[in-house]
Amino acid sequence: MGRHSCCHKQKLRKGLWSPEEDEKLARFIMMHGHGCWSSVPKLAGLQRCGKSCRLRWINYLRPDLKRGTFSEEEENLIIELHASLGNRWSQIAAQLPGRTDNEIKNLWNSSIKKKLMQQGIDPNTHKPLLQAMNRDETLRDDGQTPTERSTFTIDTLSLRTNPKPDNPPSLFSKFGFSLDSNPSVWFDASNFSPPSLKTASSSSSTSSSSMPSELGLNLKPSFGISTWGIAGDSQAQTQPCDAEEVKWSDYLNLPFLVTSTAQERQPLGAAENILRNVSSDEAKSTTMEARSDVYCKDTVRLATSFGKF
DNA sequence: AATGGAAACAACCGCCTTGAG
DNA sequence: TCTCAAGGCGGTTGTTTCCAT
């Protein structure tokens, strides 16, 4: 396919996104949802291809992104999931609310991989390097998939020696919003409690799925940015937002938390549980369907909700 | 203060899958 | 059944930031 068809038609911008472009895209999706991505740039007034817009939204602008450094629990979960799933980053990301496949992939390639190597563990097979090398010799042509590879458990891993509770403010707030309702749910990685794992580090942690069943997510537009006015709704935008605390869950029916609620339905006591689901085509498609559906519905709901501010 | 390498992050490329016509 | 557009994903590259010297 090469370059996307939409990119052939006209000169389109490439490279880093400017704040103005971010604002245009975020505003458009908040108001209208993305619908057909290929039509988004045109409707939003962007000189980008739809695919680029999609990526920018998913990896950077989406309001449910956690951002900030990964916790030790998250890293260990990634390692365990990678042992089961291989480089299926999207499936791994599905188990880490607020994290994107790109983010996880980058973390893996830039950090975790090296840490594992330093500990003498082959990042591909999750086995001790020597053993993995020998195994490579014997299994070179056996066609095993990553999911078939490893039963190695990372009992002794504790990769992060000094995790920094470093969670920068969301891009969402960058454009005049602050999501200050329940930070433990929304953005505060320090309160993120991934499912319990069979790892040394997590065995002592109080890991439980801490996602509350009710999420009082308040979206407060601070509107320092006047350009957020659209569709002649500037009056609504300038309304003081403290007067009425808006609960996202009321508007959105727990929109961004499908991943987390799915997690609750399917407690991740062990990565095998995930693998069991993922290995089933039916469950796989269900997961994917749910995920894609989430974002689509979420943006539509956000758009709907946005008018209330 | 300058600089070079490493690490982290953002975005693009190209392939695959899917669904509509 | 075939074709094509669009979405999704993983690999890779380019850019920026950090840090040691």
Image (cartoon, coloured by chain):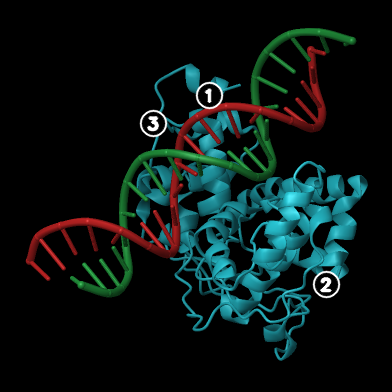
Chain colours: A cyan, B red, C green
- SS category of the residue bearing label 3: loop
Is residue A190 placed above or below B20 in the rendered structure? below
Q: CA distance from mark 3 to mark 2?
A: 44 Å
Q: Please report, as a chain letter, where disc 3 is located.
A: A
Q: Position of residue A192 (x, y in %)?
A: 64, 77
Q: Position of residue B11 (x, y in %)?
A: 45, 41
The amino acid sitting under disc 2 is Ala
Side of A273 relative to A220 (left or right): right
The amino acid sitting under disc 3 is Arg
The lab-note entry on whether marks 1 and 2 share a chain reads yes
Q: Residues within 10 Å of mark 2 (few under 14, many from 20)?
A: some
The mark that comes first in sequence, 3 or 1, is: 1
Q: Position of residue A83 (x, y in %)?
A: 74, 62
Do callouts 1 and 2 mark residues in contact (Cβ within 8 Å)? no
Image quarter of residue A94? bottom right
Instruction: Name the residue at 42% across, 30% down.
Output: A47
Q: Which residue is mark 3?
A: A13
Residue with the most extreme bottom position = A204
The amino acid sitting under disc 1 is Arg
Side of A121 relative to A118 (left or right): right
Q: Which residue is mark 2?
A: A270
The mark that comes first in sequence, 1 or 2, is: 1
